């Protein structure tokens, strides 16, 4: 039986795009809230004997986690053979150790929760710090998709004479790989964080930017403070207006508006999280990953 794709509302578009690259049927998932905030989840398809693939990117995880668990358990109760999760953005990777006495190590706790909920996980560029690999905290099979080929192809096709700029040392792992694939120069800035919303970023080397288009590249943008600080440095250096390229566009509160106002020419992101800035598609690499999991080594044209 071909896989059944069930998508939470914000992920329906991505699930539909993925379905064009592989044999699959797209099912119907209902998710609504009672007046007191409790969730009701309902599956509108026959799942008996099916491999169910849930599309639920995990931004806003406190709101989505319980409905995800309800859906997975219900699918099994109704006879699904397996339940897997496609979560292009994987939450709770920040708190991967106990920084202060008494704190929860959320990365490990959330991994246990997902392990108990689904049979396997597909995600995109998880934000790893002290955890070297997701296999270190997850027991189920985990596939991590690298978005660097898609980022490099988009930048090469859309931007003249790009120079990639990583806004902090944590971004180097993604920036260096995109630069290598696209044969583009890059520079890494250094960040000093004074608080959750107070960030100081070093200035880039102006000589490396002459006659080029700066491309600020980061994996996650939440408050946007780091990219705003980098963009302000570039504006003082009288460079060409930078382009911001983001893997996971969280954009909390007015972060997107403030970044737009900082002097950037354009903000683009992958569609790991539904957002107006989405311009770089992940459907093909996700479909390839699913085809490998279900035993098919070629994309359906």
Image: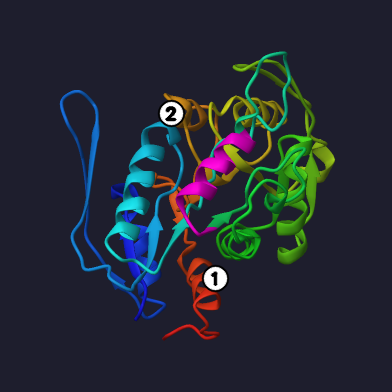
Q: Position of residue 44 (x, y in %)?
A: 18, 60
Label 1 secondary element: helix
Q: Is residue 125 left or right of residue 132?
A: left
Q: Position of residue 45 (x, y in %)?
A: 20, 65
Q: Give 110 or 16, whichever is nearer the viewer.
A: 110
Q: Where residue 289 is drawn, which disc sits there?
A: 1
Q: Position of residue 209 (x, y in %)?
A: 76, 44
Q: Which label belongs to residue 25?
A: none
The chosen color scheme is rainbow
Of residues 215 and 69, the one nearer the viewer is 69
The stretch in magenta equals 107-121
Q: Residue 193, image x and y in percent?
A: 72, 19
56 w.r.t. 230: above or below: below
Residue drawn at x 80%, y 44% as measured from the top left: 187
Q: Quadrant of residue 78?
A: bottom left
46 left or right of 18 in image: left
Quarter of image, res 202: top right
| Residue 50 falls in image quadrant | bottom left
Residue in the picture at 79% in, 30% down: 190
Do the residues bearing badges 1 and 2 touch, measured as CB atoms within 8 Å? no
Q: Residues within 10 Å of mark 1 (few under 14, many from 20)?
A: some
The answer to whether residue 43 is visible is yes
| Residue 115 forms part of the magenta stretch | yes
Q: Is 18 part of what is drawn in magenta?
A: no
Residue bearing the label numbered 2: 257
Looking at the rendered image, the disc whose residue lies closer to the viewer, 1 or 2, is 1
């Amino acid at each position: 039986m071909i896989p059944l794709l069930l998508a939470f509302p914000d992920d329906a578009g991505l699930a539909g795009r993925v379905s064009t690259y592989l044999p699959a049927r797209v099912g119907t998932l209902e998710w609504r809230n009672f007046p007191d905030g409790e969730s009701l989840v309902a599956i509108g398809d026959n799942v008996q004997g099916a491999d169910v693939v849930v599309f639920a990117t995990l931004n806003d995880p406190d709101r989505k986690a319980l409905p995800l668990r309800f859906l997975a358990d219900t699918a099994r109760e109704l006879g699904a053979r397996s339940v897997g999760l496609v979560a292009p953005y994987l939450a709770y990777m920040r708190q991967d150790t106990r920084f202060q006495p008494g704190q929860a190590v959320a990365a490990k706790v959330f991994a246990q929760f997902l392990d108990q909920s689904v049979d396997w996980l597909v995600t995109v560029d998880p934000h790893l710090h002290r955890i070297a690999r997701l296999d270190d905290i997850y027991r189920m099979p985990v596939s991590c998709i690298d978005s660097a080929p898609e980022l490099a192809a988009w930048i090469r096709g859309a931007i003249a004479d790009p120079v990639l700029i990583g806004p902090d040392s944590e971004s180097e792992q993604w920036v260096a790989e995109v630069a290598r694939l696209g044969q583009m120069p890059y520079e890494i800035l250094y960040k000093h964080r004074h608080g959750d919303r107070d960030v100081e970023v070093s200035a880039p080397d102006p000589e490396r930017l002459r006659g080029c288009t700066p491309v600020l590249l980061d994996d996650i943008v939440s408050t946007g403070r780091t990219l705003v600080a980098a963009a302000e440095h570039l504006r003082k250096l009288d460079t060409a207006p930078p382009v911001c390229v983001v893997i996971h566009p969280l954009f909390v509160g007015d972060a997107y508006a403030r970044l737009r106002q900082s002097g950037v020419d354009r903000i683009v992101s992958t569609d790991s999280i539904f957002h107006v800035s989405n311009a770089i598609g992940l459907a093909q690499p996700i479909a390839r990953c699913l085809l490998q999991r279900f035993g098919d080594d070629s994309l359906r044209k």
